[in-house]
Image (spheres, coloured by chain):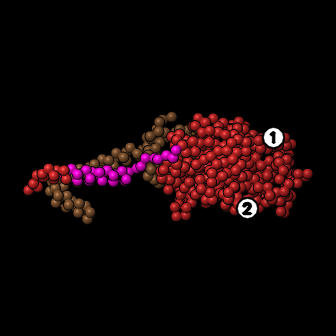
């Protein structure tokens, strides 16, 4: 039996009831669904340092915010010069021009480039002070200053004049050209000595790649010259088999590797490196000093790992010491097995960019970021080897952990890896800057 | 369930069984339609994982170019059929296809992550 036909008052009640339930359904659907981004009024991000970390962050914040976030980049240099591949300039198979990329591409993305130096931060007013120009205010600040060198324990190297006589060439640019010029000026039969600091330092395989590049130069141009590698560490720090194989085969007799060789000082009068138990004379001296986060990232208590590097939240790269300030690249205290590499800085920058876009638009920060590392080292002008790893966020340990089973390392160099190494460089420079 | 039963009984008592069923059915269909509509409209919205494909593609971009548009020896992935990308990565991972770094990297990602990154690349304009 059907229910009796409702009267007028019943119809009204029916309609009212229907609307109430339909309204509740709509509300429930709206709550359960995705919400629209709610942007803060013209949010501003300032990025200090346009290297692998900072340039990538600036570009991806512009890209992923659809241009809604105002991005200003503070950079000392007129153009980007890559540390990766710079050892080949020292070896003579590339020029500085080959590893230089202008900043025009970032401007195309709508970022403003200010060629200046950040000297101080006011975390309360959320502003930074520049050496020459007017200060800049920010909603979020990204510091990607790279590393500064620590000369405390190498007394004779404390002056700029001494540092030019024993160049580090650990920041690509004039120092790279200087070291190359010294190697070219050295008479055949001379000795090149490279000193490697205790880990952690920027780019773990790079000192050994440098030894290969100089050996490539010597074996093709100065066959009587020799290389002494003085390593503060007890063994080769990255791609050990790759380098050891190259030294044993391609460069047999050219490279004398001495582990546990910490530097005490340099005597420039006799061109001698003084170690704990021996003195080593050399014609060209390349001292790579110990490193710490760039000065601007050491302010405000941010270098809270051994007073050298900056601890960050790996979901956002926000400093654990200062709210609203993010730190990227070689300046951070890395997660386990995460190298201080340009590739890692590029990957960190994108996690940071995604988090900042989310934070400034009222969205949810990705709770499970993941990133990859692929790092190539050349053993001569054509052959290279690689090391890879995948790092995923572990919410229990609150850090990035190498994904089980992922990654690998070359035992010997190949020409195909050499081709990929060159393509890697051009693609990552474009990913940062174009 | 108690709430549902209570509401159904309440409606049935007020309006009779047929009308009660009609009300519930209408409400449910409105709810379903609206949920679908919002899900499709705001697919790039706020829920965690909504940007998974985009964010993982940014892992690949360092070697394969931004949004999978490569300038060198690594192949461009933008605009490629997602099924082909998923199959290639699985072949690298499981050793059916030789590689230098891809087999090592593929082992670090879950099937869901590979599906989402393949879908992202598939949706990009071809270079």
Between A31 and A12, the one nearer to me in the picture: A12
Query: In the displayed structure, does residue B74 sit left or right of residue B41?
Result: right
Q: CA distance from mark 2 to mark 1?
A: 30 Å
Q: Residue A35 magenta-drawn?
A: yes
Residue A30 in the image: state x and y as whole percent: 36, 50
> Mark 1, residues whose alpha carbon is within 10 Å: few (<14), some, or many (≥20)?
few
Q: Chain of mark 2?
A: A
* Image point (50%, 56%), residue name: A368
> Mark 2, residues whose alpha carbon is within 10 Å: few (<14), some, or many (≥20)?
few
Residue A420 in the image: state x and y as whole percent: 60, 42
Mark drawn on residue A264: none
Q: Chain of mark 1?
A: A
Q: Residue A58 magenta-drawn?
A: no
The residue range painted magenta reads A14-41
Which residue in the structure is indicated by mark 1? Answer: A181
Q: Quadrant of the N terminus of chain B?
A: bottom left
In which quarter of the view is residue A135 placed? top right
* Image point (21%, 59%), residue name: B8
Colour assignment, chain A: red
Q: Is residue A239 above or below residue A83?
A: below
* Image point (73%, 59%), residue name: A198
Q: Is residue B31 above or below residue B126?
A: below
Residue B7 in the image: state x and y as whole percent: 23, 60
Q: Earlier in the sequence, mark 2 or mark 1?
A: 1
Visible in this render: residue A208? no
Visible in this render: residue A143? yes
The residue positioned farthest toward the front in the image shown: A9
Which residue in the structure is indicated by mark 2? Answer: A234
The residue positioned farthest toward the left in the image shown: A1
Name the chief secondary structure element in magenta.
helix
Between A96 and A356, the one nearer to me in the picture: A356
Query: In the displayed structure, does residue A46 sit left or right of residue A292?
Result: left
């Amino acid at each position: 039996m059907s229910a009796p036909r409702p009267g007028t008052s019943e119809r009204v009640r029916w309609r009212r009831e229907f609307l109430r339930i339909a309204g509740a359904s709509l509300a429930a659907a709206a709550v359960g669904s995705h919400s629209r981004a709610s942007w803060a009024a013209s949010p501003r991000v300032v990025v200090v340092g346009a290297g692998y970390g900072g340039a990538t962050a600036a570009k991806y914040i512009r890209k992923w915010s659809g241009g809604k976030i105002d991005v200003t980049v503070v950079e000392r240099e007129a153009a980007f010069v890559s540390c990766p591949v710079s050892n080949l300039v020292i070896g003579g198979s590339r020029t500085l021009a080959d590893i230089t990329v202008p900043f025009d591409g970032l401007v195309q993305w709508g970022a403003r480039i200010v060629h200046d130096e950040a000297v101080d931060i006011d975390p309360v007013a959320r502003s930074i002070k520049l050496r020459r120009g007017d200060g800049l205010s920010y909603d979020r600040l990204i510091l990607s200053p790279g590393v500064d060198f620590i000369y405390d324990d190498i007394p004779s190297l404390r002056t700029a004049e001494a540092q030019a006589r024993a160049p580090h060439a650990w920041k690509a640019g004039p120092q790279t050209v200087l070291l190359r010029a010294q190697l070219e000026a050295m008479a055949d039969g001379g000795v090149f000595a490279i000193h490697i600091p205790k880990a952690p330092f920027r780019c773990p395989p790079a000192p050994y790649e440098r030894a290969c590049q100089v050996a490539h130069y010597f074996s093709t141009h100065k066959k009587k010259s020799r290389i002494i590698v003085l390593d503060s560490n007890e063994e080769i720090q990255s791609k050990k088999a790759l380098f050891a194989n190259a030294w044993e085969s391609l460069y047999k007799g050219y490279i004398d590797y001495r582990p546990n060789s910490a530097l005490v000082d340099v005597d420039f009068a006799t061109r001698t490196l003084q170690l704990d138990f021996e003195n080593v004379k050399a014609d060209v001296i390349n001292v790579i000093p110990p490193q710490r986060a760039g000065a601007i990232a050491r302010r405000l208590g941010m270098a809270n790992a051994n007073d050298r590097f900056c601890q960050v939240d790996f979901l956002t790269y926000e400093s654990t010491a200062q709210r609203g300030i993010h730190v990227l690249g070689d300046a951070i205290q890395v997660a386990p097995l995460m190298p201080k590499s340009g590739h890692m800085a590029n990957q960190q920058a994108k996690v940071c960019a995604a988090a900042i876009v989310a934070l400034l638009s009222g969205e949810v920060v990705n709770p499970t970021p993941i990133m990859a590392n692929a790092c190539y080292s050349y053993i001569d002008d054509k052959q290279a080897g690689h090391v890879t790893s995948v790092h995923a966020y572990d919410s229990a340990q609150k850090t990035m952990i190498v994904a089980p089973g992922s990654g690998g390392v070359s035992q010997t160099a190949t020409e195909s890896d050499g081709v990929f190494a060159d393509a890697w460089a051009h693609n990552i420079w474009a990913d940062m800057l174009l | 369930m108690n709430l549902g039963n209570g509401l159904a009984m309440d409606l049935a008592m007020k309006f009779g069984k047929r009308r009660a069923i009609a009300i519930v059915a209408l409400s449910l269909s409105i709810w379903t339609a609206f949920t679908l509509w919002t899900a499709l409209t705001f697919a790039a919205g706020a829920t965690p994982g909504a940007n998974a494909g985009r964010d993982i593609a940014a892992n690949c971009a360092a070697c394969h170019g931004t949004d999978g548009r490569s300038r060198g020896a690594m192949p461009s992935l933008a605009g490629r059929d997602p099924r082909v990308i998923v199959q290639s990565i699985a072949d690298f991972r499981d050793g059916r296809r030789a590689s230098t770094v891809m087999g090592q990297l593929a082992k670090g990602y879950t099937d869901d992550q590979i599906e989402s990154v393949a879908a992202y690349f598939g949706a990009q304009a071809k270079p």
